[in-house]
Image: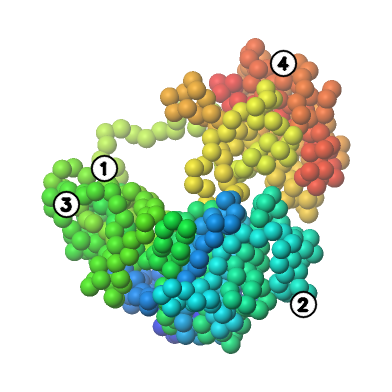
Amino acid sequence: MPTVDIDPDELRELTGHEDKRDDDLIDDLFGLGLEFEGRTEDGEFELEFAPDRLDRLSVEGVARSMRYQYGDARGVHVPSPNSAEWTIEVDDSVPDERPYVTGAVIRDVNLDEDALDSLIQLQEKLHATMGRKRAKGAIGIHDLTMLKGGSATEGASTIRYVGVEPDEDRFVPLDSDEELTPAEVLEKHQTGEKYADLVSGYDRYPAIYDDIGLFSFPPVINGRRTEVSTDSRDLFVEMTGTDQWTIDKMLNIVCYALSARGATLEDVTVEYPDHELVRPDLSTKTKTVAHSRIETVLGIDLDPNEVIDLAERSGLDATKSEDGETGDSEESITPLEQRDGLEERRSVDDSSEPRGIDEAAPTGDLVYEVTIPPYRVDVLHPLDVIDDLGRAYGFNELEPTYPDVGTVGGRHERSRLERAVRTQLVGLGFEDLLTFHMSNEAENYERLDVEPDSDAYGAGEPATIKEPYSEDYTILRTWLLPSLMTVLERNTHRSYPQHLSEIGFRAALDDGENTGVGESRHVGAVLANHDAGYEDAKARLQTLARNFDVNLETPPSDHPAFISGRTASVVIDGEDVGVIGEVHPKALIEYDLEVPVAAFEFDLEALQ
């Protein structure tokens, strides 16, 4: 899980609870879902956070959540930006692969060392998560006093987002004293080499200019001229990417973090060739939640006023309606008179999400229209709202109750089988594992030389995640062996032998299923040792088959992940259900393993 480093003293200062002991802070953070993982070398808290709450990637965001938890802040707060004095002009030459840009001006921010470190951490964490390692969105933060904007028709200062030839212009990038062209940055600069793959295939590279010249080469690196320091008081934040919604939401998170430092926000006009936007987009959205659904999910009785109180203590706003009407599905703009003077602004490219409507609400039921603040990107469904209400109430305060049903619970037959097989594997010397069901195509196929459209065991077209939070988890795995090999890769510092097994979920597209996805449980095992071989793996597999009274055959076969001549199919009761063999040396090198590995994997249902 992702982690974020938080200075406890700074957290106390930003929450206004400077008398809080560290142990109390850790307990309060756990109530928000932030788990304490230990301390860094500098004494900061290392916190594991849920990757959906990207607004908590900085101490400012964590402090904001804690102020709501303590009752020191209530309801939705939307800053009121000043009118735009700067314009980003988007040229037709901008690469089609990265066409979108957004921005904001930040005035009068107090950047001491702690604040600057927090801003840098927030930038990098957003790059790694929502920005997909800068591929979907990249952030540039500049010292505004070092920019010289060109004149525009309405008197605003203008910078230009354009496309340039790889060797068309030169600038001095961060951490360098040498003028380089964009192409040279990708070849000679450490950061350029790291992110070269993002733009190396472009005919023209993205670039941002002011009246002085090139000062930003997104998504790779900024220029040294506009570098931000503790002396910077006015900032220009620009973001480019492949999706307008993504970079706009990333911008909102950064703006809220800097606003918590006392900064004033200022609009920026984004002029595309065919339309114009005003950013940041601080519009709110609304979810409709039924009162009965809240009580059913949380298992408690709540007064309507208590629900509204819980919503406000979660940083939300809620109004009740007894007619059960849910309205149309569109994003709402917070009215001027209700939100600190925020101007009503709606862009022509309004990429609104459908309003979350609680379909479980009976007609005439009491419902709540819940307003979601601009920095929340995780609220996609009414259940997300209910989760917030439950945290505000306190999950530890919920009392367990027996369900009002007339049956006695019992273990499912599949669960009984899993438990029995797991017990047998442990008895055979394997250490039981539970790894992630989600993976990516490189891990699932490429590292073991498996083609998705081949007939090899573990191949098959994967079920993909439509909107993944990370490029590391974009598909559901189609087999278990890659997960087990990854564990071996991360355990090279431990002694051998390492005998690992897992009974886990896998999935692949299947037109024969009603859902279009075939799901099953597999049994996977690896043996890593200096003398591990096919015979060792087969001996354990034979014992497992014998204990479950099934007939096992292992006819020779070929598989790209295994050594030819040391590979066989796993045939149980006449059905081909898996593969067994010695892992190919190419795969051992890929996973940085210096000992042989034997492995087998098959369908769990074959043992029934």
What amino acid is labelled 2 in the image? Asp
Q: Which residue is mark 2?
A: 177
Q: CA distance from mark 4 to mark 2?
A: 67 Å
Q: Is residue 59 in view from this perspective?
A: no
Of the residues under marks 4 and 3, which one precedes in the sequence?
3
- Asked if the residue under mark 3 is in contact with the one under mark 2, i.e. CB atoms within 8 Å, the reply is no
Can you identify the residue that label 3 sits on? 366
SS at circle 3: loop
Mark closer to the chain start, 1 or 3 = 1
Percent position (x, y) of residue 449?
Answer: 74, 34
Mark 1 vs mark 3, CA separation in Å: 13 Å
Type of the residue with mark 1: Glu
Q: Which residue is mark 4?
A: 553
SS at circle 2 = loop
- Mark 1 residue element: loop
Query: Which one is in front in this view, the residue at disc 2 or the one at disc 3?
Result: 2
* Residue in the foreground of this view, choosing between 313 and 278: 278
The answer to whether 53 appears left or right of 196 in the picture is left
Q: Residue at x 26, y 42 (%)?
A: 359
- Quick one: 146 or 30, which is closer to the camera? 146
What residue lies at 27% left-to-right and 46% top-to-bottom?
Answer: 358
Give the x, y percent position of residue 405. 27, 36
Q: What is the quadrant of residue 269 in the picture?
A: bottom left
Identify the secondary structure beneath mark 4: strand
Few, some or many residues within 10 Å of mark 3 (<14, 14–19, 20+): some
> Which quadrant would the N terminus be assigned to in this image?
bottom right
Inspect the image, locate mark 4, and give the three-letter code of the amino acid beneath it: Glu
Q: Which residue is mark 1?
A: 359
Say what amino acid the circle numbered 3 marks: Leu
- Of labels 4 and 2, earlier in sequence is 2
The reply to whether residue 141 is in sight is yes
